[in-house]
Image (tube, rainbow, N blue to C red):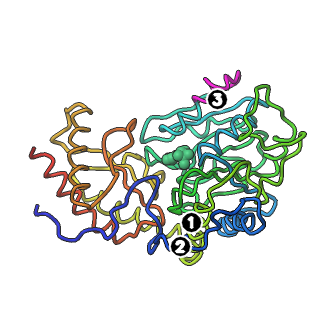
Amino acid sequence: MTRPTTRPERPQFSSGPCAKRPGWSPDVLKSALIGRSHRAAPAKARIQEVSDRSRAILGLPEDWKLGIVPASDTGAVELVLWSMLGARGVDLLAWESFGSGWVNDAVKQLKLEDCRVIEADYGELPDLASVDFARDVVFTWNGTTSGVRVPNGDWIPNDREGLTICDATSAVFAMELPWNKLDVVTWSWQKVLGGEAAHGMLALSPRAVERLESHTPTWPMPKIFRLTKNGQLNSSIFDGSTINTPSMLCVEDAVDALRWAESVGGLQGLVARSEANLAAVHQWVDASNWTDFLARDPATRSCTSMCLQIVDPALADVDPKTVAARVKIMTKRLDDEGVAFDIGSYRDAPPGLRLWGGATVETSDLAALLPWLDWAWQESGKS
Ligand SMILES: Cc1ncc(COP(=O)(O)O)c(C=O)c1O
């Protein structure tokens, strides 16, 4: 196979921080309220604009709260685990690295007495039918490091007693989320919207707010995790008054990303862009003799973090370290060519590739990349 000639216009296929929206330039930050107090009226309004536009695009129910919290998606999830868990038993679902991280926090850091861990290996979903919704449930909508997503919310009952706590950072704005099945949803700007990291979004259902107001954890709560004041929700956090100082540059960038999201048709447009990316990769994978989706069940294949494993028959009996070394040669070559950056699989995942297909990635760029992958795989076998 000869070296392809057409390069992707934008070689950014990282799974986070993800590609900026098409047409982005630093000029979008020109009106940022830099050097102003984040408590000043115009700055608060700009911060609130992020929540308002997000709410409208996502169709968040009126009675939900949406706020900006410190430390990206991780901050949002940790804050929730520390504030809400312990009121009842919890089922923790994990099928890749990030879900396993939340399991670790509940079991080893919080040392919760009544935890059930429901796990599956890379490429699979755990047994969703075994989840007990009388308990709290913590799960990741899209497992970013295995490319396995839950296909829908049908496995979650409407009349559950526990709370469903969902890390949706690599799903939101690219997949429909059934809000009536969820109680807590978290994400960061750095994923599907191509915004900046370090700020987390926290969406709370009325039942989640009720939990915050009725449950006082036995452990101390750092200031950046505190959502209540005198036993009541500190509602100013959900009205443009962040817990601590946000970056007004990042806020401006998030507003720009949301305006772009509206311009491509809102949630429907974003989902369509991401699904088109999955379809393009799917078609190519179907014809490939050396790679396949890590996600076994097609219904669980992510349209954002598309994780591929190596199935080259020539390497059938080779140990994973050798396969990983070859993938490294391949991805370095692609990087050197300026064709694809950051597409190696996550460090704890099986060796392979991870292509981001969130809404900011153009399908034409993925289509241009695919022949390069075939070429680079072939080349990597020659050294
Ligand atoms: C599912 C999931 N959870 C949590 C995180 C951590 O996000 P952040 O670094 O924005 O806190 C990531 C990042 O890739 C993720 O994919």
Q: Are marks 2 and 1 in contact (CB under 8 Å)?
A: yes
> Which amino acid type is marked by label 3?
Ala
Indicate whether 88 appears above or below 373. Answer: above
Of circles 3 and 2, which is in front?
Answer: 2
> Which amino acid type is marked by label 1?
Asp
**Residue at the image position 26 percent from the left and 55 percent from the top:** 335
Disc 3 to disc 2, C-alpha distance:
40 Å
The residue indicated by pointer 3 is 106
Residue 176 in magenta stretch: no
Q: Going by the image, does 233 lie left or right of 190?
A: right
Q: Dot 3, how many residues are within 10 Å of its Cα: few (below 14), some (14-19), or many (20+)?
A: many
Indicate whether 242 appears above or below 79. Answer: below
The residue indicated by pointer 1 is 253
Q: Going by the image, does 127 lie left or right of 287?
A: right
Q: Which residues are magenta?
A: 104-116
> Which amino acid type is marked by label 2?
Val
